[in-house]
Structure formats: C-alpha cells, structure tokens
Image (spheres, rainbow, N blue to C red):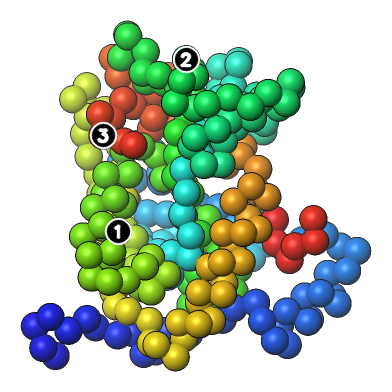
Amino acid sequence: MAKNEIAVVNNFDLVTISGDLAEAIKEEMDGLGSIAFDKVKIPSGGGLAFEIPGEDGEEGDVEKTITGIILDHHPANAYWEDKFSGGNEQPNCSSFDGKQGLNRDTGELRSCEDCPNNQFRTDGAGKACKNVHRCYILREGNPVPLILTLPPTSLKYLRDYLGKRILMKGMRCYDAVTTIGLKKEESAEKITYSRATFSFTGKIPEAQRTEVIGMAKFIKDNYRKAIGLDDSDYNPGSVATSSAPGADGEFMQVSDAPENLPFV
C-alpha cells in the first residue's frame, strides 16, 4: 500500500434497512410499535469496557471496543429542575442540537447559549444542564444502530478524530469503519474517569457507499429528535456524590468541551 493510500475494509458485513428486510419489518411490526435502539454510555470510575445490552434487553455483553460506522452524531442537552438522581424521570428541558432547548412543561423554546442553566457555575461544580454527544453506530451484521452517548470529557477526542483522520482525508464520518475504545484518565481533582478513544480501521468500499449514505440520511432526518433523553443517556456513576471541586459525575468542567418509524 502506498504511503498516502487509505486502507479499505472490504469484508465489512453491511446490513441496512432496505429491500426485503424493510418490507418484513413493516409487515411483522404492524401494531407492535417500533424496534428500540440499544444505548451504550461511557463507564464511570475509569472502567475499560462497554456494557452492550443483550438481545433480551437485560443481561449485556462486555466489550472492550465497539467497531462500526458512525452514521450520524449530534450534541444533546438536558436539564432536570430537581437534582438528577439517575432515575427514569424525563428532563424538564432538552435540546437535540445543543443550540435550542424545549421546556417540557411550558413548551417554551430557549437558546442554549444564553440559558443560565448551561453556564459553568462559579464554584467549579460544572453546569446544571448536562451536555453530551450522541453517536449512531452501525455495527457488522446488525441493521439497528447502537447509540453511544459521550460525556464532555470525550468530546475533544471525537473532534480531533473526525477533524484530522476523517474530514482532512476527504471523508465523512459514515465513510469510515471506526473502532472506539476506552482509556482511564484522572482529573485535576484526582477523580478517575473513563474517556473514549477513536481509531480509523479503514474506509468502506465504494460499492457500499450509496447504501450507507442512505442509512445515514435516514437516521439524521428521522431519529435525532425521535429518541427521547433520559437516564440512559447520562451516567453520574460513583463520583456523582463527590464534593471535590469541579466534579459532577462524568460531567466535570472541561474547558474545550464544546411515528411511523421502524425504530425508537
């Protein structure tokens, strides 16, 4: 392979919702609702493995890495008026683009940039509003994307990966097979946490690109706002109760942290 040649993953088992599978879903799921996306988050306390929900939605598989195509990604914010406890309560205000939030109780739209709940608190305890980034990952042999939720402590690494390894090479996120791992870090307050790592596995073959782009557009157009935010998107973990300055679970202050569907 030439020095500047980009590796191609020719054996990626790509399965998308199309053709016979799309028709089967339409017929078999009629009246039953939608197929749920599985959600995965960065483990707390410096854990180095992801827990992937099992087929029964209960017992999960433990995986050190997640490999697949990042079909889409976007910021998401959520604010709970009462202290977030990790229960199933829905946020009082949420945003699916990190720019404009919707108050669930009043229907009011508010700018996230100007909202006082989205500002770093002077005591160093982070923001009242929780900021994360959702990634929709299509894995081999599985047409249902996996949602990986990244806390602010991982965003710099996603930004660097997409900017330097993907965009500057003339690709988009859905052109690449990406492997996501975990690394243990320690904050200035000596709090151990986990952050994501991203590595380029290879480019998808040109023959698969049209199908992948179609799936990526489908996710972007239909699911950014269709899947609600709840406790499964956030992981206060064991450090949530820490009184150390700058600690708010995995949401510690980070200076440069920036209806008729087959799924729900």
| Left or right, 135 with reference to 264 | left
Which three-letter amino acid code belongs to the residue tagged 1?
Leu
Instruction: Indicate the quadrant where residue 27 lies.
Output: bottom right
Q: The N terminus lies in which quarter of the figure?
A: bottom left
Task: Tell me the element at label 1.
Answer: helix
Residue in front for this viewpoint, 2 or 194: 2
Q: Is residue 242 visible?
A: no
Alpha carbon separation for disc pair 3 and 1: 16 Å
Q: Say if residue 90 shows up in the picture.
A: yes
Residue for point 38% across, 32% down = 250
Q: Position of residue 192 (x, y in %)?
A: 27, 33
The correct choice, above or below, for 8 with respect to 54 in the image is: below
Q: Residue at 48% x, 65% y: name it.
A: 71
Q: Nearer the viewer, residue 257 or 82?
A: 257
The secondary structure type at the circle numbered 2 is: helix
The image quadrant that residue 90 belongs to is: top right
Q: Which residue is mark 1?
A: 162
Residue labelled with disc 3: 256
Expressed as whole percent of the image width and height from the top left, the position of residue 100 reads 55, 33
Q: Residues within 10 Å of mark 2 (few under 14, many from 20)?
A: few
Amino acid on which disc 2 is placed: Pro
Q: Tell me if mark 1 has few (under 14), some (14-19) or many (20+) residues whose alpha carbon lies within 10 angstroms of its own.
A: some
- Give, as a three-letter code, the residue at label 3: Asp
Label annotation for residue 116? 2
Q: Mark 3 falls on what kind of element?
A: loop
Say the numbered circle drawn on residue 123: none
Residue 124, image x, y percentages: 30, 14
**Quick one: label 3 or label 2, which is nearer the N terminus?**
2
Mark 3–mark 1 contact, CB under 8 Å? Answer: no
Image quarter (top left, top right, bottom left or bottom right) of the C terminus:
bottom right
Can you say whether 235 is above or below 128 in the image?
below
Q: Give yes or no for contact between labels 3 and 2 (Cβ–Cβ under 8 Å).
A: no
